[in-house]
Image (cartoon, grey):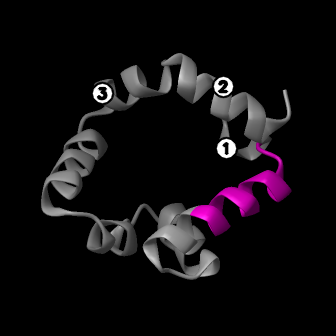
Amino acid sequence: MNAKNIDPNKLNALLSAVSGKIGVPPEKLKKELESGKFDSALSSMGKQEAEKFQQAVNNPKLIEKMMSTPQAKALYKKLSGE
C-alpha cells in the first residue's frame, strides 16, 4: 500500500472526518501524520486507546497484520479509487 496512490479528495475527506472527531484542524492533523507525530490524535484518546495506539505504532508486524485485514484493504481501495 502506498499513500501516494490515494485520491487527494478522498484523503482530504478522511482527514476532515477524523479532525472533526478529535477537534484538530485537518491541515495540522495532516502535517503531524506526515511527520510521524500523533500528538493531537493521542491527546484526544482515552488512556487505554492511546496505549494501544502506541503499541501498534512501535510494532511494525502488528501494523502489517492490521493493514492486511479486509476492512483495511477495503478502505485503501476506496481511498485510492481502485
Whole-percent x, y for residue 7 in the image = 83, 48
* Crowd band around label 2 with a 10 angstrom C-alpha radius: few (<14), some (14–19), many (20+): few
Q: CA distance from mark 3 to mark 2?
A: 18 Å
Residue carrying label 1: 3
Which residue is labeled 2 in the image? 74
Residue 15, position as x, y percentages in the image: 63, 63
Residue situated in front as seen by the camera: 22 or 53: 22
Q: Considering depth in this image, is 16 or 57 the residue closer to the camera?
A: 16
The location of residue 12, given as percent across then percent down, is 74, 63
- Looking at the image, residue 12 sits to the left or right of residue 17; the answer is right
Q: Earlier in the sequence, mark 3 or mark 2?
A: 3
Question: Which of the image's four quarters has the C terminus?
Answer: top right
Pair 3/2: label in front:
2
Q: CA distance from mark 2 to mark 1?
A: 14 Å
Marked residue nearer the N-terminal end (1 or 3): 1
| Amino acid on which disc 1 is placed | Ala
In the image, residue 48 above or below residue 21: above
Who's the residue at 22% across and 53% down the image? 49
The amino acid type found where label 3 is placed reads: Leu
Q: Which residues are magenta?
A: 6-17
- Mark 3 highlights which residue? 62
Residue 11 sits above or below residue 59 on the image: below
Which quarter of the figure is the N terminus placed in? top right
Which residue: 25% across, 35% down? 59
Rounded to the nearest angstrom, the CA distance separating label 1 from label 3 is: 18 Å
